[in-house]
Amino acid sequence: MKLTAITLILSLSLSAFAAEIQKTPKLGKVSMDEMKSSVCPIDSSAQGYYLFEKGATSFVYRNTTIREGDPGSDKGFQMVFKNHKRVKILDKAASDLGNFEISLYNKGLNKEKIASIKGITYNLENGKIIKTKLDTKQIIYEEKTDHITLVKIAMPDVKAGSVVEIEYELVSDFLFNIQEWYFQREVPVLYSEYWVGIPEYFHYKPSTYGYYRIHHNTKTAARTLKFTYMYRTEGNVTESRRHEYEERYQEKITTYFANHVPAFKKERFLKASKNYLTRMTFELEGTRFPNSPYKSYSNSWSDVSKELLEHERFGRALNRDNFIGNDADLIKASATNEIEMVQKALEYVQSKMKWNGSYSFLSDRHLKQAWEAGHGNSADINLILVSLLKSMDIQAFPVVLSTQGNGILPLSHASITDLNYVIAMVELEDQNILMDATDPLSAIDLLPERCLNGKGTSLMPTDLEKLVWKPPIVLRPLPRSP
């Protein structure tokens, strides 16, 4: 993201940012009342509860000195997310509340990283508060996929009566989505607050979920960008000159908060907890930088379809040469009708491919490589199924969706970031037959429970020059064929 043709240095006052969150209790300053607490003030049955959780998202400019002729030195904005939470453990059975997990995303040269993590466990022994600090050995980095790393934190010396506290800072190159915020947890939350400061150059759409009221107040603050540009005069190859000037802008600051949020109680037949938790998300709608027109990032589902169908690991993967060989012809010859052909194709992929447990709507590698390896993520397997069906002259399409654990797909506004899964679909005898080959027990009219989450959208990747977006597909088990 660039501000102007002449590149800039951000001189955003850190003291101003700190002033906005100065009410946050300092790490290490736990009270005796918190230590002596033996029952949650808002739920006497709770085994633990959040004393508070506070977050803050701000924008900073990454470079300090920009040099003429070095466009790579202008790296634009980064997003800084800070989280500070304090949790009371009332019962040994709630010791898991002392474990935390942070997800980091990376793609190409862009990444998310942890800038700092601090944590303390407090215990009351003989009337004194004993502190045990988090050690780096209790922080594990686990690569979940090629693009996602999980940071797992196990707080030390956690037991009944403990108070655990953690504070971390995450720096992200990705500006399309401000960090999601959960006001509700699996245990009661006495106070939750999210501070978001957005420069006027960015326009985000906030979305709220759940049933408990989120309060907010908004104000603006004047900020100053200090621009520094290093250059050489004509004929001078050694001496650099610098040009500095300031540009003022407005920052929109919104504080969202909720008090006494009850624990989220997961019902036995509740499909997706995330759909009902009180939380907020923010998606980039557009940007307007100085001396530049407004750039919209709002997409329709047709736009998303076009992006996916042109993606190297989605639509273009389906349009490569057939890699399955004569197997498609053999399956086709062994079936007496189309429905049997579809069934045999599904069973064939199920027998040849093993799911690695990774959810994705994009393949991890070329489908031929996944096929030869015999394993892959959900996209590898189900795009292979679509490819096989197409080789058998059956009208098959991928259907992208959001699984239960990822939340309902918000069809009112299209966003590729809300997707995390893909299945196969065949249009046959006026029916949409949905299939998922990752599960060896699934059938042509039965999807795994994780996929039954509202609606998905189907794509026709047969011709990239003639894009087709079909209406949303209801994700439910279909009636069994006779």
Image (cartoon, helix red, strand yellow):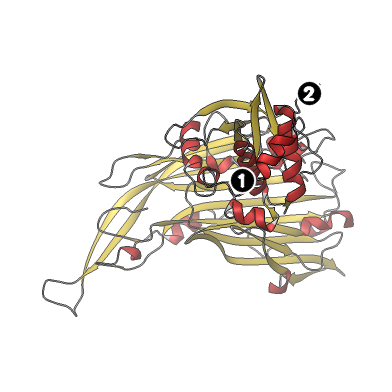
Q: Residue 368's spot in the image, x, y percent?
A: 60, 53
Using the numbered discs, state the Cα–Cα distance from disc 2 to disc 1 in whole angstroms: 44 Å
Residue type for callout 1? Trp
Q: Does any portion of residue 422 appear in the rendered image? A: no
Q: Looking at the image, which is closer to me, 221 or 428?
A: 428
Viewer-nearest of discs 2 and 1: 2
- SS state under label 2: loop
Residue type for callout 2? Ser
Q: Is residue 104 above or below residue 448?
A: below
Q: Is residue 210 above or below residue 371?
A: above
Q: Crowding at label 2, few (<14), some or many (≥20) Cα neighbours within 10 Å?
A: few
Q: Does any portion of residue 98 appear in the rendered image? A: yes
Please tell me which residue is depicted at 47% across the width and 32% down the height of the picture.
302
Q: Which mark is residue 437?
A: none
- SS state under label 1: strand
Query: Mark 2 and 1 residues: CB-CB less than 8 Å, in contact?
Result: no
Quadrant of the frame with the C terminus: top right
Q: Crowding at label 1, few (<14), some or many (≥20) Cα neighbours within 10 Å?
A: some
Please tell me which residue is depicted at 42% across the width and 35% down the height of the picture.
465
Q: From the viewer's perspective, tell me whether residue 467 is left or right of residue 139.
A: left
Q: Residue 2's spot in the image, x, y percent?
A: 33, 54
**Pointer 2: what residue?**
481
Please tell me which residue is depicted at 60% across the width and 39% down the height of the picture.
391
**Pointer 1: what residue?**
181
Q: Is residue 371 above or below residue 412?
A: below
Which one is earlier in the sequence, the residue at label 2 or at label 1? 1
Q: Looking at the image, which is closer to me, 420 or 436?
A: 436
Q: Residue 192's spot in the image, x, y percent?
A: 65, 46
